[in-house]
Image (spheres, rainbow, N blue to C red):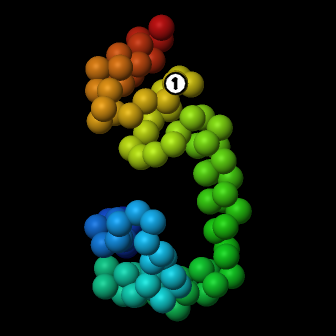
Amino acid sequence: PETYWRYHEYVFANQPPEGEEWATTNKLVSFAEEAGVTETEQLRTKIQEQAYESPVRETSQAAADAGVSGTPALVIDGETVNPLSDEQRTRTLIEQLADGS
């Protein structure tokens, strides 16, 4: 888990502007090496086998079905909100959920 989060943060910190192709196997493995991941050949194999394609597609579809069109986004009790652009609504929904309303 610790290595995952280092890798996750490294990828997001180093990705190029949207629309630019960059998520190649070699680039993702290189990012992993630079982030300190030691099992990079296992990662390379999983990427080449598309081992996570199905869960990623399912998650993407679930997000689209919930009305998520970008990040950051939260789905709180069935309502999709952007916590950065609608902080008050996000706070209200969380408080209502916590109160059981």
Where 55 sits versus 74, above or below? Answer: below
Circle 1 sits on which residue?
A: 79
Q: Amino acid at mark 1?
A: Glu
Quick one: label 1, few (<14), some, or many (20+) residues within 10 Å? few
Question: Is 21 left, or right, of 64 in this rendering?
Answer: left
Percent of width and height locating residue 37: 38, 82
Is residue 2 at least partly visible in the picture?
A: no
Is residue 34 at least partly visible in the picture?
A: yes
Where 59 sits versus 78, above or below? Answer: below
Q: Residue at x 46, y 45 (%)?
A: 70
Q: Residue at x 30, y 72 (%)?
A: 14
Query: Which residue in the rendered view is the most extreme toward the front?
Result: 19
Q: Nearer the viewer, residue 43 or 12?
A: 12
Percent of width and height locating residue 13: 28, 67
Percent of width and height locating residue 69: 51, 42
Q: Residue at x 35, y 70 (%)?
A: 15
Q: Residue at x 49, y 30 (%)?
A: 80
Query: Which residue in the rendered view is the most extreme toward the top?
Result: 101
Q: Nearer the viewer, residue 1 or 43?
A: 43
Q: Quadrant of the N terminus?
A: bottom left
Q: Nearer the viewer, residue 35 or 69?
A: 69
How many numbered marks does the figure carry? 1
Give the image quarter of residue 46. bottom right
Give the image quarter of residue 81. top left
Where 90 sits versus 11, above or below? Answer: above
Q: Nearer the viewer, residue 82 or 59?
A: 82
Secondary-structure class at tag 1: strand
